[in-house]
Amino acid sequence: MNQNQKSEPMHVVLIGSGIMSATLGVLLNKLQPNWKIDIFERLDAVSLESSDAWNNAGTGHAAFCELNYTQEREDGSIDCSKAFKIDEQFEISKQFWAYLVHHKMIDEPNDFINRIPHISFVEGEKDVAFLKKRFDTLTKNHLFKGMEYTENHAQLMEWMPLMMRERDVNQKVAATRMDLGTDVNFGALTRQLFAYLDKQKNTDIYLHHEVRDIERNDNGKIWNITVKNLATHEKRVVKANFVFIGAGGGALYLLEKSDIPEAEGYGGFPVSGQWLRCTNEAVIAQHHAKVYGKAAVGTPPMSVPHLDTRIINGKAELLFGPFAGFSTKFLKHGSYMDLFKSLEWDNLIPMIKVGLDNLPLTQYLIEQVRLTPEERLEVLHSFVPTAKMEDWTVEIAGQRVQIIKKHPEKGGVLEFGTEIVHSADGTIAALLGASPGASTSVSVMLDVLKKCFPNAMKTLEWQNRLKQMVPTFGKNLAEDAALCQKWRDWTTKVLEL
């Protein structure tokens, strides 16, 4: 692909119909309307895997309440750099969504985003001291302007009555509250983005089509993508200048098919999840917040317990969890052979090494799988002392695949973030990993554009269009309080928050 000839029509293929492919598709459509975009999804509707509301936490991760984004250093100080970065990334996402709403490219913002307070809650002297230091450090930066802190039981009763009712008044507890927090239904948002793309003359969305193979053609400049129509069982080869693999847990297997050297050594560790879902409307009405606690020592970041108000299809829901589990599937609608099909000679050693180095994680997952309903209720009681088993039911969450990669000294390491893997020539890219994922989708896809279209990104044409879609593109919101407040106010108004 000649990056200098960006104005010439290109054929782009996006694999998967989640929030990442939808976001990249809209960005490319606005940056280069003459490019042909084909989107392939193996299921019979878009956004049924990780982006679906019941499969995704939907917190609108802004680092307001997620304690694992602020680590305590050895000297006792709090490292907030990751929290600042994630909060800025979420602001960028809101700007892009507000742009789309403002220009009537998507409808009804409250169908996918609503204001819900974000609360961090801790128990015990040690964690209370940590939370206070976290609060003091975060609120020195304008990104966290408006955050409140309290150890007062009466104040906490106002913030989260369901959690404080019948709690021991002598228990040492504390919480921070950020009223600016949101709940995002990424399934609804993704469907709106695809509805917009479906109206564009140069974009085609193919449902029930599974990508079976990806390989370069003989001259090495074009990708041949073998696609099977699952309804007719017919196969065809699609030729593309650029390929993005946004297939969630299925991305690793397809990336391996490409045989690019940059993909060597990558493996995946699948983790499934479950929620406790409240079925009692009276109980649901007593809680209006996303309350995150602290993960137990030695447990993975995705195990952070939270009592989560969700707005799904216009209705308030209440979830608690997640409870982790293990399955060899890489997708909720995948195959039990997914893990085994991902094994190759170049990732076998890293995966074995990670398995040996993470035996406590394996033990934790086994223990989670073996939890009885009574034991799950006991965990819930730490958040909701009055919880009754008849008010809650188990809801199966989405499947996540954590990154395993080569390490020069350790052999292999397990990563809990997200990572873009792309070829040296920028003609193919894949997104691996999970958290914080959907909430930072716009920033992540802007990174894909930077890595895969570096020359085009430098042109005045693309720069101007990107600044229309993301007004603070190229600016540092953590260092400019006035700029941050200006665009926060604008997105709050446009998104009706």
Image (cartoon, grey):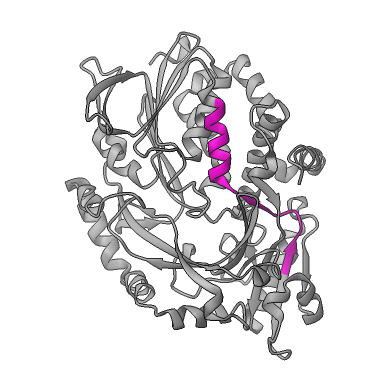
Q: Judge whether residue 191 is colored magenta.
A: yes
Image coordinates of residue 295 in percent, x first then y, are 52, 71
Range covered by the magenta-colored residues: 176-196
Left or right for 263, reference 285: left
Q: Nearer the viewer, residue 4 or 344?
A: 344
Above or below residue 330? Residue 220 is above
Residue 407 in view in this figure: no
285 relative position to 253: left or right: right
**Rendered location of residue 433, percent (x, y):** 42, 49
* Quadrant placement of the N terminus: top left
Q: Is residue 322 above or below residue 403?
A: below
In terms of image quadrants, where is residue 360? Answer: bottom left
Q: Position of residue 133 (x, y in %)?
A: 70, 70
Dividing the picture into quarters, in which one does residue 256 lie?
Answer: top left
- Apparent side of residue 91 relative to residue 222 in the rendered image (left or right): right
In which quadrant of the rendered view does residue 29 lie? top right
Task: Tell me, yes or no, if residue 285 can be seen here.
Answer: yes
Task: Say which residue appears at 71% left-offset and 82% top-offset.
Answer: 165
Q: Position of residue 129 (x, y in %)?
A: 68, 77
Of 455 and 398, nearer the camera is 398
